[in-house]
Each structure stands twice: as structure tokens, then as C-alpha cells.
Amino acid sequence: MLFQPEIPQNTGNIGRTCVALNAKLWIVRPTGFRLDDKQLQRAGLDYWQYLNWEAVDSWPKMTELMQSERTWLFTKFGTKNYTDAAFEKGDWLVFGSESSGLPESVRAAYADRCLSLPMVGPVRSLNLSVAVGVGLFEAHRQVASPES
């Protein structure tokens, strides 16, 4: 799930990753672009037609649809490494906007479910599509693994 994404190319790339893993993409408005934006679909290449996606008008409306006990927030403020989470089929993976991430109020509501990606260099954050790829592929690896 993307919380108020701002850059259509990132969302297009994330959509392509979702198609590769058969994951539904949820988008929480407002966005920094129109959802029929040509840049969005160009970044998703010819896979956009295969993407299962839905946009929701607000965070409160989104929370009505989610199961909070199966929701994971990816944030640089996370206190748990993303590889320490035990992902299950049907989990919600939430990623913030490119410029401001997830609001503190959202993070506070899921304080024990905030995950981070380790960064050892002087980088403050990763590109949103990279972060989603890392998180989504780890969740997929765990769910698809015969040991899980």
C-alpha cells in the first residue's frame, strides 16, 4: 500500500513489481499525480493492464478495510528490522510518500509494527520503489517458503 505517493514513475515501477508477485496495489489519496497519468503507465510498461489495484480516498477509509494485526509499516523510524518480521499471506505492507514518509500519527498507531531497512552509509532514505521491492520480495519469500 502506498500512502499518498507523489511520483508517478515510482508508482508505475511498484505496480510492475506487484504484477510480478501477484500482489494487489492499494493507493491512499491524495496523490501527487493523476492515476491515469501517462508517466505512471509508462513506468509500469505494458504490465499495467495486469495490475490489480485500487485507490482509496483517505487513510481513515483505508483503515476500515485493513486488518491492523496484519499491517506492517515500512519507515526509517522502525524499531524492528524488516527481516525480523514474520510475514503471512494477506499481510498489509504500508509505505509512505517520497518526501515525507508516513505521518507520526500513523506510525504511532502501529508502533509495534514499524519496520526499517538497514542502511549503513550516509543515506537518509531509499527510493520508494526500491524500498517496496525489498519489503515485498521478503514477504513473498517468507510466504512462498516451504518452511513457513
Image (cartoon, rainbow, N blue to C red):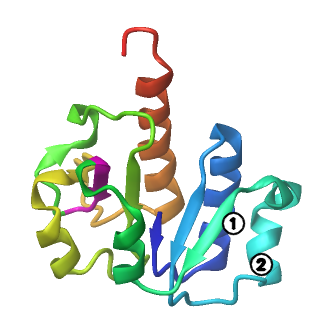
Seen from the viewer's position, the closer of residues 57 and 138 is: 57
Residue 39's disc number = 2
* Distance between the alpha carbons at the discs numbered 2 and 1: 8 Å
Please report contact status of discs 2 and 1: CB closer than 8 Å, yes or no: yes
| Residue 39 spot, x, y in % from top left | 77, 78
- Structural crowding at the residue carrying mark 2, measured as other residues with C-alpha within 10 Å and reported as few (<14), some (14–19) or many (≥20): some
Q: Find residue 63 and report its horizontal and vertical position in percent.
A: 34, 71
Say left or right for 131 vs 105: right
- In the shown orientation, is residue 114 left or right of residue 141? left
- Residue at the far top: name it: 147
Which residues are drawn in magenta?
70-76
Q: Which mark is residue 12?
A: 1
Measuring from the top left, give residue 57's x and y in whole percent: 51, 86
Q: Residue at x 45, y 9 (%)?
A: 146
Left or right, 85 with respect to 93, comes to left
Under circle 1, the secondary element is helix
Expressed as whole percent of the image width and height from the top left, the position of residue 64 reads: 36, 71
Give the residue drawn at x 23%, y 62%. 76
Q: Identify which residue, 10 or 104, lies in the foreground.
A: 104
Q: Secondary structure at mark 2?
A: helix
Task: Say which residue appears at 65% left-offset and 78% top-offset.
Answer: 8
Residue 88 part of the magenta-drawn span: no
Three-letter amino acid code at the position of disc 1? Gly
Amino acid under disc 2: Gln
Tag 1 or tag 2, which sits nearer the N-term? 1
The answer to whether one can see residue 99 in this image is no
Q: Residue at x 54, y 65 (%)?
A: 26
Figure quadrant of residue 37:
bottom right
Q: Nearer the viewer, residue 9 or 90?
A: 90
Residue 113 vertical position relative to residue 134 in the rendered view, above or below: below
Residue 11 visible in image: yes
